[in-house]
Amino acid sequence: MEFQFPSNLIFLFLFLSFLYLLVVQWKKSRNLNKKLPPGLWKLPFIGSAHHLALEGGLPHHALTNLGKNHGPFMHLQLGKISTIIVFSMDMAREILKTHDLAFTSRPKILALDIICYKSTDIAFSPYGDYWRQMRKVCVLEFLTTKNVRSFSSIRQDEASHLVQFIRSSTCGELKKM
């Protein structure tokens, strides 16, 4: 007689494992949110993104409407990304003046780590010594006056190709307005 493992136990184990991971993630996110400003209520997986859709219109108009209702700054969870939105220009100036180093880096995104070799290029590397060194190399080696002038003919050719492409892709004649 052959031994058969009950399939109910497998499903029970998978369900309990999923439930455990969900509770651990929930506790972790609850501990991180203690220092965040007040924000909108969130749904699983999409966060507060549904509030932008409910406001209707363009996202910047929806954010303006939310700012009128919720004060000078608020916390907005867009999927997995936590965002602080500052609506007051004076408050934004003060935050960026006193905490500029905390806001100079980009968020860590797995796709960029894969495509950009662990974010080692100048565009996506986090702010720090490596980024400053890369910037110095670019300015001193690649963006010299001689190098910029040597590529001016290529830039002019590409600009004229772009204008011709736009001109050929129009569906009618241009009219003065």
Image (spheres, rainbow, N blue to C red):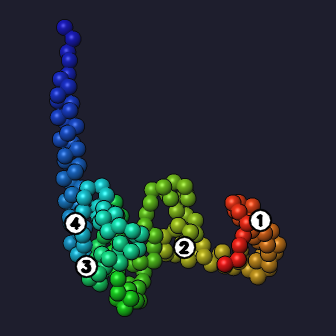
Q: Going from the N terminus, do you reach mark 1 or mark 2 first?
A: 2
Q: Are marks 1 and 2 in contact (CB under 8 Å)?
A: no
Is residue 39 placed above or below 20 in the rendered structure?
A: below
> Which quadrant of the rendered structure holds the N terminus?
top left
Mark 1 neighbour density, 10 Å: few (under 14) some (14–19) many (20 or more): few
Tell me the CA gap for discs 4 and 2. Answer: 37 Å
Residue 23 shows up from this direction? yes
Residue with the mark numbered 1: 164
- Residue at 41% across / 74% down in the picture? 60
Q: Are marks 3 and 1 in contact (CB under 8 Å)?
A: no
Is residue 33 placed above or below 118 in the rendered structure?
A: below
Residue 67 in picture, x, y percent from top left? 31, 79
Q: Going from the N terminus, do you reach mark 3 or mark 1 first?
A: 3
- Residue at 19% across / 46% down in the picture? 19
Residue with the mark numbered 3: 70
Residue with the mark numbered 2: 131
Which residue type carries mark 1?
Answer: Gln
Mark 4 neighbour density, 10 Å: few (under 14) some (14–19) many (20 or more): few
Is residue 31 placed above or below 17 in the rendered structure?
A: below
Q: Are marks 4 and 2 in contact (CB under 8 Å)?
A: no
Tell me the CA gap for discs 1 and 2. Answer: 38 Å
Please give the label number shown on residue 41.
Answer: 4
Which residue type carries mark 2?
Answer: Trp
**Residue in the foreground of this view, choosing between 14 and 60:** 60
